[in-house]
Amino acid sequence: MNSLASDHGNERSLFTALTGRYFVNPAFDYLLIAGGLSLVVAAAAYLFDVQYRIADEFGRPTARFWYLVALANSAHFGASTVRLYSKPGATRSLPLLSWGLPVVALGLLVLCMNWPESWGSNLTSLYLTWSPYHYAAQAYGLAVMYSYRSGCLLGAGNKTMLWWVAMIPCFFNILIVKNAGLDWIIGGFVFLLHQIGFPVVEHFSLSEQFTLTAVRTIQVVASIGGMSAIAYLMWRVSRSREGAMPLIVAVLLFINGVWWFVLAQQPLQAFLWASVFHSVQYMAIVIIFHVKDQVPDNETSLGSVFFHIVWFYTASAMLGWALFQWLPYVYMCAGFNMAVSFAMVTAAINLHHFIVDGYIWRLKKSDSNRQIVDAGSVVPG
């Protein structure tokens, strides 16, 4: 490995280790990639009770916050697909993901459109269950990237603990969200037992067993436990031979918790706001990786960098907008209900995005992702 590997562990000063190495600069990395900017928005939304609505009771998009959907959410979903097909060698090494998964997704979508009460509702529950995991996994992945980039080559034990700490908001949501997580899994299992003749109730909801006080108590315990776990993780790694992780790792993990715990007074609002912040974070890092893949290391032209930034974002935004805003109307023209069309398309796009992301962000030593993580700043000098 390069000189990054030799500059790790106790050879680094504590200040150097905590400062770490940025992809662009401290302001960009902390505000957009780590999510610092979202703290300001989250605080304003919480204090002024700003409700984020993207659809009315009929499933039609509302005018309020349409720009967040267009500029962030839709673009971020399109970005994973654009990244898959523009990343050098990706379609060749991942043929089933590139050409088979879209066909499977469209087939599943047709199935769910025809049977929305059974297949469709389960597809939606799967997407709502997977979403918090996906966001937590992104926080974990970014934490690993910054650790590697800063010379902290995490051992297996510390890497495992980092994963568990990153997953705390995910576990919270799996426990308390209605029609998703354990509520969906246990409810489905109880319904199946009832159908085959066991003397159990037909419908059971775990989330309905929790009072508002119980949910708030779990929320407080998870928040305090999460912050304590982050502090312990940072201390533990700093005492190991790998040396301290950069401070931005703690910020990433903390802010991912804020998205779910501070805004979780209403779980749907937490889902919606977290999706916006996650999208901004995702677009910032994916554009960096795209530029590094497309612009040679010896390239000093800011014009070339700017071109690839604009091209990637525009392609992602247009694809995302077409999928979310136009594809449902195709199904409506085929005779399907508007609300069902928008709901099923949204769930299918999310699941496709989750699966694609699981492959295109791997950090194998031979992958260009790892080379970018180990390399210097993406901004030409």
Image (cartoon, rainbow, N blue to C red):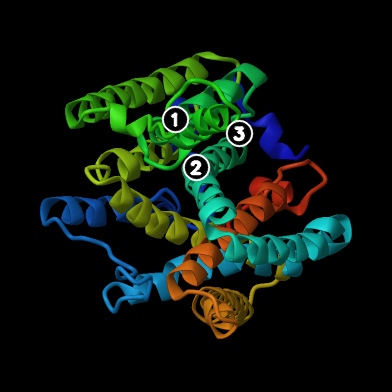
Q: Can you see residue 280?
A: yes
Up-down relation of residue 159 to residue 132 (above or below):
above
Q: At which x and y percent is residue 185?
A: 52, 33
Q: At which x and y percent is residue 295?
A: 70, 70
Residue drawn at the location 28% of the way across and 65% of the way down:
53
- Quarter of the picture containing the C terminus is bottom right
The residue where tag 3 is placed is 151
Q: Is residue 95 left or right of residue 114?
A: right
* Amino acid on which disc 2 is placed: Thr
Q: Can you see residue 298?
A: no
Q: Could you give the CA–CA distance between mark 2 and mark 3, rounded to whole angstroms?
A: 34 Å
Residue drawn at the location 67% of the way across and 45% of the way down:
374
Depth check, front residue: 77 or 345 = 345
The residue where tag 2 is placed is 129
Q: Mark 1 and mark 3 in contact (Cβ < 8 Å)? A: no
* Amino acid on which disc 3 is placed: Gly
* Amino acid on which disc 1 is placed: Phe
Depth check, front residue: 14 or 332 = 332
Residue drawn at the location 55% of the way across and 56% of the way down:
120
Depth check, front residue: 319 or 34 = 319
Residue 318: image quadrant is bottom right
Q: Residues within 10 Å of mark 1 (few under 14, many from 20)?
A: some
Q: Secondary structure at mark 2?
A: helix
The residue where tag 1 is placed is 171
Is tag 1's residue or tag 2's residue first in the polypeptide sequence? 2
Q: Is residue 365 left or right of residue 68?
A: right
Q: At which x and y percent is residue 362?
A: 71, 45
Q: Could you give the CA–CA distance between mark 1 and mark 2, rounded to whole angstroms?
A: 10 Å
